C-alpha cells in the first residue's frame, strides 16, 4: 500500500478523525503519515489548520514537525512527519513514576516547547502523556496539533485561523484539560497548556493522574475545584519547591498560573533559586554608619523603585546598633529567624529605649508567630516613636492574631496608613485586621498592598485570610501556594495553608506536613502547635493532640485561643474541672471573645450548672447574636431551668439561622411537649424524621405526641419502626411492652 510516494509499513494508531501509519520514503527513511478518515467540512478545516501550524515548527522547537503533505485520489488529506522511535510518555508511565531529575528535565523541555508555540500565539489544547514522544536519544517532543489553535490573532498566522469549536464545546482530554477549557474550548490560552503540563508532571512524580473519579462529572468537578491529593503525601521525597511549581501550574484560576510554557520552564530550570526572596523586613529606616553615618531607606527585596516611609528622620544611631539591626534583617531575608531574633534581642538589650530596635525585634517575633512577645515590643516601639508607621501596622497584626476581631487592631492599621499610605505593610495590616468582619474590604486592602509590592508575603497572607473568612477555601489554598513559591518555608503561609486544607477535608497528613515545616523556623509558635493538635485530633490521636496544646500554652501563656483549645481538648478527655479552668483563663485574657463564653456555657450545661450556663451563653450572645450554636446552648440552659417558653424561643432563633440542624428540631419538639403544644411538637419531630429517618429519640417522642393527639395508628407505626432499629436491652423491652398495651386498647 502506498500513499503518494510513501510505502506504508504498518498501522501505528487510529482515532476518531484519522489513522497514523509507519511509512518509508524512497530513501528508506522511517516516517509517520497521518491520514484523515472522515473528510467532512469541519474535519477538513481542522486538518488543514493542523498542517499549517505544523509547518511553522522544526524539531529544534521541541515539536514533531511537518515533512510533507498531500491528498489521496479520493480527496482524503494526509501529512507526513518524522517517525519518533522512542515511544510515548504514556508508555514510560506504565512502569511507574519517573526519577526526579527526569521529571524536571521533561518539564523544562515541554515548557520551552509549549512556550515557543505560545510566543507564536498558538495553544496546543491537548497536551497529555500520549502526545509526548521521545526521540532515539531521549529528547521529548510534543506531537498532535489536531486541536491546536491561535489564541492571538495579532501574531503571524493568527488571522488565518478560524474558530472551529462551537461556544461551550468541550475539546481536550479530561483530567489534563484546564477548567476554563472544559467550560469552553474557545477560552483556552497559554495558561491552559501550562495546566496540562502541570497534570503531566504530577503524573510523572506520583504515577497517577491528579484528577481521578468514577465518572466524567466527578473528574470535571475535581478539576474545577482544584481537588487532588498533594504530591508530598504520595511521594514525600519530592522537594517542596518542585511541589509548589506543580501546584501553581494546576491552580483553577488561569491568571494565577505561570503565564506561559516559557515561564513554567524557567521556574523548573532555576529550582529553589527561582523563588524570589521575601521582602526583607520592610518596616524600619535603619541608620547605618559605614565610614560616615548614612541613613538608609527601608530595606525591601522587591522589584521597582522604593518610596521611603513618611516618618520623621531617625535620631542619630551608634554604629554598632545600626549594624546589628542590619544583620538581623539579612538573617530574616535568608529565613534564619532564630539568628535574626538573637541579633535583634542583643540590640534591644543594649538599647532598650530604641524604637528601631524594638520594632525590628517585634517584626522578627511576628515572623516567628510569637504574637504576645511581638505585641510587647511593638507597643513599646510606638510609645518611643509614635510616627513609626510600620510598628503600628505590625502591632495590629499581633493584636488580631489573639482575638478574632478587634477595633483596636483596625485603629492601629489605619494609623499606619495615615502615616505611610505608600507602605504595603500598612494596607496588609488593615486587611488582616478586617478579614473576619469584612472579608471583601480586607481583600481590597490586600490587593492594594500587592500592587505596591507584588512579592510581599504579608500581603499574600492577608489575601489568604480574606478568602478563608469568606469561606472561599479553594482560593485560600491556591493563594497560599502562590505565596509559598516566593518562600517555601514561610511559617505563616504554611500554617494558613494547613488551616484551609483542613477545612477542605484534604486530610490531616497534609496539614501536619505544612505545620511541621513551619515549626522548623518558628518552634515557639503557639498558633502552629494549636493547628498541629487539630490535625492530630482529626487522626484520632487525642493524647498527642493534648500534648501539643500544652506546648502551645507553654510557648505563649497569654494566647487566649491556645487556652480555649486546651480547655476544649481537656473537656473531650473527661477532664472537666481542668477544662473549665483553662477556658476561664482564656476569658480573663480575652473577655470579648465569644468562643470562650460559649465553650464554658456548654461545659456548665453538662455539669448541671444551668444558671452559670445561662449567664455565659448570654455573654456569648451579646458578642455573636447570629451564631446558632450560642442560641442553642442558651436554649438548653433555659430548658433545664424549666423555662420552656424562653427555651423554645432560643431554639427557634437557632433554627431561623440554620434550619438544617436536626438535633435542634428534636430539642424544639421535646420543649414544646413540655408546654403542651403537641401540634407544634409534632411538626418539629416530623422535620427531624424527614432529615434522619432512624432518629430513635425523635421516633419515641413523636409516638408519645401522636398518642396525645389521638393518632394511635401513627404512634404504633413509630414504635414498630423504633423496634426495628433498637438493639436488645431494657429500653427495647420497655418499648415492646408499651406497644402491646397500645395495640390492646
Image: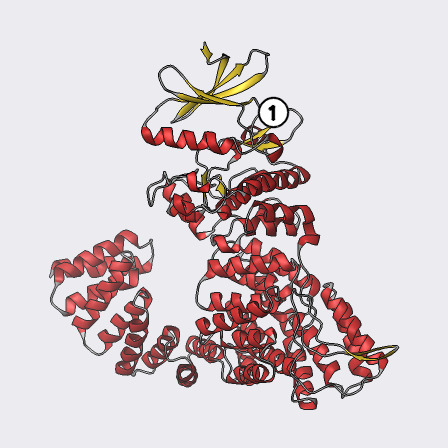
Q: Which residue is mark 1?
A: 86
> Residue, x 43% and y 85% (percent of image)?
619
Looking at the image, residue 583 sits to the left or right of residue 526; the answer is left
Q: Residue at x 53, y 38 (%)?
A: 208
Which residue is at the far top? Answer: 1
Residue 436 horizontal/vertical position (percent)? 47, 74
Looking at the rendered structure, the secondary structure element under dot 1 is loop
Residue 627 lies, in percent from the top left, at 38, 75
**Quarter-wise, where is residue 375 in the image?**
bottom right
Give the quadrant of residue 702. Answer: bottom left
The answer to whether residue 60 is visible is yes
> Can residue 578 be seen?
no
Q: Which quadrant holds residue 710?
A: bottom left
Total count of labels: 1
Where's the C terminus, which quadrant?
Answer: bottom left
Q: Position of residue 393 (x, y in %)?
A: 60, 79
As drawn, 385 above or below 279? below
Look at the image and tell me in which quarter the N terminus lies.
top left
Establish if 706 lies above or below 60: below
Amino acid at each position: 500500500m502506498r500513499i503518494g510516494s510513501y510505502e506504508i509499513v504498518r498501522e501505528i494508531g487510529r482515532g476518531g478523525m484519522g489513522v497514523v501509519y509507519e511509512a518509508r520514503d524512497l530513501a528508506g527513511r522511517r516516517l509517520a503519515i497521518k491520514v484523515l478518515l472522515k473528510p467532512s467540512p469541519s474535519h477538513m478545516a481542522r486538518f488543514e489548520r493542523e498542517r499549517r501550524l505544523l509547518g511553522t515548527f522544526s524539531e529544534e522547537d521541541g515539536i514533531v514537525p511537518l515533512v510533507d503533505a498531500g491528498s489521496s485520489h479520493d480527496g482524503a488529506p494526509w501529512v507526513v512527519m518524522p517517525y519518533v522511535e522512542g515511544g510515548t510518555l504514556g508508555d514510560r508511565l506504565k512502569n511507574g513514576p519517573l526519577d526526579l531529575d527526569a521529571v524536571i528535565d521533561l518539564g523544562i523541555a515541554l515548557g520551552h516547547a509549549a512556550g515557543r508555540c505560545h510566543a507564536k500565539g498558538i495553544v496546543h489544547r491537548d497536551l497529555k502523556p500520549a502526545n509526548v514522544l521521545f526521540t532515539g536519544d531521549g529528547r521529548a517532543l510534543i506531537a498532535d496539533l489536531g486541536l491546536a489553535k491561535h489564541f492571538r490573532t495579532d501574531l503571524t498566522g493568527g488571522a488565518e485561523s478560524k474558530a472551529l469549536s462551537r461556544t461551550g464545546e468541550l475539546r481536550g482530554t479530561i483530567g489534563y484539560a484546564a477548567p476554563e477549557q472544559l467550560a469552553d474550548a474557545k477560552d483556552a490560552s497559554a495558561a491552559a497548556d501550562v495546566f496540562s503540563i502541570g497534570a503531566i508532571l504530577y503524573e510523572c512524580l506520583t504515577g497517577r493522574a491528579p484528577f481521578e473519579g468514577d465518572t466524567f462529572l466527578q473528574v470535571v468537578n475535581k478539576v474545577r475545584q482544584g481537588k487532588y491529593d498533594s504530591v508530598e503525601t504520595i511521594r514525600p521525597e519530592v522537594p517542596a519547591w518542585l511541589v509548589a511549581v506543580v501546584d501553581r501550574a494546576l491552580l483553577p484560576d488561569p491568571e494565577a498560573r505561570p503565564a506561559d510554557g516559557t515561564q513554567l520552564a524557567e521556574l523548573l530550570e532555576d529550582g529553589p533559586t527561582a523563588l524570589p526572596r521575601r521582602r526583607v523586613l520592610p518596616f524600619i529606616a535603619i541608620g547605618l554608619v559605614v565610614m560616615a553615618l548614612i541613613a538608609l531607606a527601608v530595606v525591601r527585596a522587591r522589584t521597582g523603585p522604593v518610596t521611603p516611609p513618611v516618618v520623621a528622620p531617625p535620631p542619630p544611631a551608634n554604629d554598632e546598633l545600626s549594624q546589628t539591626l542590619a544583620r538581623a534583617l539579612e538573617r530574616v531575608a535568608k529565613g534564619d529567624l532564630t539568628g535574626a531574633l538573637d541579633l535583634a534581642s542583643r540590640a534591644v538589650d543594649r538599647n532598650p529605649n530604641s524604637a528601631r530596635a524594638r520594632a525590628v525585634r517585634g517584626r522578627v517575633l511576628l515572623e516567628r508567630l510569637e504574637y504576645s512577645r511581638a505585641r510587647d515590643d511593638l507597643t513599646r516601639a510606638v510609645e518611643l516613636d509614635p510616627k513609626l508607621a510600620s510598628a503600628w501596622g505590625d502591632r495590629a497584626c499581633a493584636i488580631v492574631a489573639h482575638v478574632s476581631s478587634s477595633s483596636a487592631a483596625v485603629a492601629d492599621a489605619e494609623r499606619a496608613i495615615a502615616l505611610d499610605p505608600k507602605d504595603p505593610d500598612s494596607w496588609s495590616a488593615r486587611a488582616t485586621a478586617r478579614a473576619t468582619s469584612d472579608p471583601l474590604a480586607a481583600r481590597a486592602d490586600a490587593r492594594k498592598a500587592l500592587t505596591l509590592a507584588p512579592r510581599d508575603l504579608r500581603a499574600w497572607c492577608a489575601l489568604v485570610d480574606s478568602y478563608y473568612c469568606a469561606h472561599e477555601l479553594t482560593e485560600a489554598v491556591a493563594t497560599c501556594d502562590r505565596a509559598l513559591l516566593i518562600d517555601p518555608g514561610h511559617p505563616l503561609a504554611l500554617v494558613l495553608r494547613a488551616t484551609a486544607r483542613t477545612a477542605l477535608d484534604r486530610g490531616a497528613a497534609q496539614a501536619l506536613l505544612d505545620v511541621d515545616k513551619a515549626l522548623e523556623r518558628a518552634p515557639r509558635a503557639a498558633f502552629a502547635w494549636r493547628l498541629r493538635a487539630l490535625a492530630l485530633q482529626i487522626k484520632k490521636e487525642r493524647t498527642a493532640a493534648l500534648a501539643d496544646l500544652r506546648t502551645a500554652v507553654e510557648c505563649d501563656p497569654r494566647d487566649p485561643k491556645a487556652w480555649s483549645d486546651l480547655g476544649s481538648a481537656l473537656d473531650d478527655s473527661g477532664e472537666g474541672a481542668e477544662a473549665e479552668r483553662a477556658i476561664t483563663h482564656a476569658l480573663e485574657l480575652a473577655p470579648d471573645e465569644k468562643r470562650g463564653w460559649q465553650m464554658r456555657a456548654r461545659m456548665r450545661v453538662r455539669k448541671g450548672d444551668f444558671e452559670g450556663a445561662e449567664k455565659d451563653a448570654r455573654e456569648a450572645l451579646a458578642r455573636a447574636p447570629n451564631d446558632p450554636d450560642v442560641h442553642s446552648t442558651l436554649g438548653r440552659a433555659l430548658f433545664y431551668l424549666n423555662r420552656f417558653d424562653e427555651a423554645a424561643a432560643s431554639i427557634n432563633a437557632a433554627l431561623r439561622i440554620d434550619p438544617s440542624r436536626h438535633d435542634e428540631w428534636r430539642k424544639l419538639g421535646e420543649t414544646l411537649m413540655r408546654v403542651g403544644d403537641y401540634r407544634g411538637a409534632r411538626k418539629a419531630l416530623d422535620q427531624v424524621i424527614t432529615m434522619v429517618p432512624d432518629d430513635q429519640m425523635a421516633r419515641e417522642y413523636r409516638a408519645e405526641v401522636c398518642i396525645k393527639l389521638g393518632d394511635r395508628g401513627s404512634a404504633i407505626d413509630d414504635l414498630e419502626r423504633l423496634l426495628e432499629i433498637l438493639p436488645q436491652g431494657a429500653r427495647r423491652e420497655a418499648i415492646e411492652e408499651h406497644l402491646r398495651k397500645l395495640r390492646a386498647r
